[in-house]
Amino acid sequence: MFDFTTITTAIDQFLRSMMPAQFAIIVECILVAACALLAYVMFAIVMIFMERKVCAAFQCRLGPMRVGPWGLLQVFADVFKMLIKEIISINRSDSFLYRLAPYLVVMSSVLTFCCLPFAKGLQVLDFNMGVFFLMATSSFGVLGILLAGWSSNNKFSMIGAMRSGAQMISYELSIGLCMLTVVTLSGTMQISELVEQQHDAWFIFKGHLPAMLAFVIYLIAGNAETNRAPFDLPEAESELTAGFHTEYSGMHFGFFYVAEFMNLFIVAAIASTLFLGGWMPLHISGFDTFNMVMDYIPGIVWFLGKTFFIIWVLMWFRWTFPRLRIDQVPTLEWKYLVPIGLVNLLIMTVCVVMGWTF
Amino acid sequence: MEMKKPTIKSIPYEEFKDNETLESLIKELNKERTNVVVGALDDLINWGRSNSLWSLTFATSCCGIEFMAVGAARYDFARFGFEVTRNSPRQADLIMVAGTITHKMAPVLKRLYDQMADPKYVVAVGGCAISGGPFKGSYHVLNGVDKIIPVDVYIPGCPPRPEAMLYGMMQLQRKVKIEKYFGGKNHRAKKGEMPNEPIIVTNAPIDINENC
Amino acid sequence: MNLTFIDIKEFPKRMEEYRYSKGMDFLRDIIGMDWGEEGLGAIYILENTATGENIEVATITANREKPLIPTVCHLWNVAELYEREVYDFFGIYFTKHPDMRRLFLRNDWVGYPLRKDYDTSEAINPIRMENEVTEDVQRPYEIAEDAEQAIIDKQTNKIHGDQYIINIGPQHPATHGVLRFRLALDGEEIKKIDIHCGYIHRGIEKMSESLTYPQILALTDRLDYLSAHQNRHALCMCIEKAMGIEVTDRTQYIRTIMDELQRIDSHLLFLSCAAMDLGAITTFIYGFRDREKLLDILEEVTGGRLIQNYNVIGGVQADITPDFVRKVKEFCQYQKGKIKEYNDVFTYNVITQKRMKGVGVISRADAISYGCTGGTGRASGWACDVRKRHPYALYDKVDFKEIIYNNGDCYDRFWVRLDEILESIHIIEQLIDNIPEGEYKVKTKPIIRIPEGRYSASVEGSRGEFGVYIESRGEKSPYRIKFRPMGLPLIAAMHKILKGAKVADLIAIGATLDYVIPDIDR
């Protein structure tokens, strides 16, 4: 497999030869930030376009067709419009928190985005507590949503925010349990290491039954984390008009909109990293020629292929399922997913201890 | 930089009715010269705005059902960039006043309009919104929404066919395409004033009067 | 039907007698009347649901300044809103009524519009652009015992200021129009609900008093635009009955088929909107996709998609097109197969079932007392189909069964509509091949005058019983015309159904009750 570290070390050495080490690090930070944000925005645009087309396909429609070939430029038009739309400031609201909230949401998803291993060596943050860091950053997005709802001085927003708080904090638990299941199997929390360990077989095959169960629970909980149907209660269109972002206009709303899609991408990317091997090609031990052929496909293609497959599955859920009621959301989590997750973790531990894994 | 005639992809310019209104607007805007860079930026912004007009989910009566039909499978306004209807007025660019506006509803509609973020456009859909329609004589009906909010495009019909609505929305797109965001005079009047000369969408062919 | 006048002093006792001794448990409508010199009054149409017996009673008060009529809302729950409507339009106070506020018009409205001496000038009631101050008080009035009989306003708070109050509507995606619910919440649970109507009150009844009968026909389509055919059918039937016009068999066939097509259209829209309100947007589009096929047929015959203006006095506007029969048959075949698709994608989904089963239950007795006809009543086990109770057109000749479910929850209300689509197809299939030859319209006089008297007719609209009541004085236009709204009883029952429900349940209940706001407000 091609290792991106060769490129990054080359750049690093080049910069260090030009300037003192401290400056080099600063320049690298800026470069990385620019690349990460650019990638973030590009993925958001791709995702929004994909959502529209997938949704249209499910609904016997065509979706955007007129702006650019097959409507490819539609999202760009939306972005231009949103950038120059008036940003309304609300009377009698906490204007500092009101303005801060969308940035918190975006910040959380950008930080999480940086942890994703796109290909071998192509990863911004990679250290021995990777999984833990990932969970921490992804969960402070809920703070932004709570603040948005509270500071808008709007009752719909408030209800939306409270729903969101109740939902995201509970489902965080299931996500944690599923990740722990994988960590138990692999014995490491470093993300690059996790991927490397899947070179002979993906974790979903290695961990067989408990891993598959964890994968399913992860998809459900991940869907809830991103506030998408059937868990779109915080912004339940037919109940709360637009939920926690009712009062936001222009680019502030745009941030929430983009963050929602990127959270979906992140959830799918983590699922593919933890369970489907991330950028690791499909390897079957024993079939060396087959593995060699698979290796010719670049890692980033594998990673994006798996991720977008999962995104497609989640979109399928979104467009066919009705919405849950607020009391059914915690019921599903606390009465079903958490107990199953705990038992699953126990089974996985037993499997690992007894060596019943592949 | 001169402002060009607004065109819609793959529909000939002449096929649209009421080009005169737009041309007079363009003439007025072209009186003041604009820098090329600013003009190009304006073009980009107008392209973005006109292709991404999100409508507010607003319907009071019959026309609302037809509006839903325009969003559904057969007519599908998402094709033209009216991708989603937003339920919150803050996020909407366009309000389709679909249905009768009564005395009790009038302040609510005005408030909704005020809550929308700029730039905002109003389309009066159907006879009731234009003039009170069949309920003109009633004691509780507002005879035309243009009495309380400025209207950009009128779509007559009771209710208008979905095709008429799409046509009206395209007329709005054309109108949005001849705006100046940076500098220059905007054809939209100052805040609080009614904009001049709305576009009339005609269902009937122009020569209908000659035939009968 | 004869109208019995009851003296106002005996009125409460006699009404109680009707309710309990004679078993008149269904109050179909209260019609406020302004009889000029004779005074103001109200006509009550009662029905015994067990025997199908109908009576009309009326009471009258000569005092125009301070008209007082005893309330009947302790006998029939639905009277609460009906009486508020009469108060709103005629200024009649119903004594001991728990909540005597205006129902449709603004609180600061001057005068009572349906009185004959009402001044319609703009100067008295200009368009007020300031927001209406929401009164969260109920206004029971009592009458002082002394000779002056002063009206004592006893305000009581309906919703307290310190409760968490949210407004669902007037502009809200789930109210299907401009209805406004003021909810007092405890967490997500609804504690109290206050309903504000009138955001689309167009004054159709008042307008009709100065229009000729053929002109009024045009307005009926716009009442409940999803039962445009049935509404117009009712008015045509009423006028034809009054004038003694016999319509041809061909007309009857066409009218019946069109009524049923309209019912399918309405139920498809119901299915779509119910699904959208529950969050399943794809099903919404599926419903609309199939509805378009039906609209094609309607458009070809009548020229309109939604508002069709098809029935006229003495027949129908135009004959059916040559390939109408073929197209309807094709549609019936097509639609039968699609029901399964809706079920697969929506109805059998576990979330749908959890959201609808056992939610928003209304018992049979309540359904009758609140007058919830149509699918809502039938889901509660009340056989209230006008097509069976008082058959009109060809409904006594065709074979169809009345869909009745017994739980009265959202899920049953949903299924009633789905089953009725199939039943309507069944009716159409019996008729479509046998449309007799003949005139589609009989000749009528150029100017239509109805002989003096009172006439009523009712049909089964898409969402309940739609009734027309005309009082004529032999003129070109009616002295008073009243349309029985299908939706008003449904929202009257709302606070009963909502006991202990959550905000999300309100949406599910609202979706399955299937009201259309212009029909409520008229």
Image (cartoon, coloured by chain):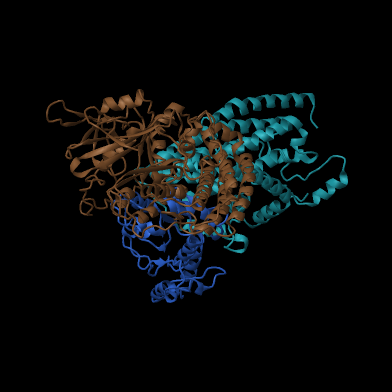
- Residue A299's spot in the image, x, y percent? 74, 49
User: Of A294 and C309, which appears nearest the observer?
Assistant: C309
- Residue C348's spot in the image, x, y percent? 62, 36
Is residue C514 found left or right of A128 in the rendered image? left
Placement of B39 over or under A116, stated as above or below:
below
Q: Number of marks in the image? A: 0
- Residue A159's spot in the image, x, y percent? 44, 36
Specify the quadrant that holds the C terminus of chain B: bottom left
User: Of A27 and A209, which appears nearest the observer?
Assistant: A209
- Determine if residue A121 is in view: no
- The chain assigned the colour brown in the figure is C
Placement of C438 over or under A291, stated as above or below:
below
Is residue A165 found left or right of C97 in the rendered image? right
Q: Quadrant of residue C84?
A: top left
Is residue A238 found left or right of A215 in the rendered image? left
- Residue C233's spot in the image, x, y percent? 44, 49
User: Of A23 and A286, which appears nearest the observer?
Assistant: A286
Q: Colour of chain A?
A: cyan
Q: Quadrant of residue C184?
A: top left
Placement of B198 over or under A203, stated as above or below:
below
User: Of C337 and C496, which appears nearest the observer?
Assistant: C337
- Determine if residue C390 is in view: yes
- The chain assigned the colour blue in the figure is B
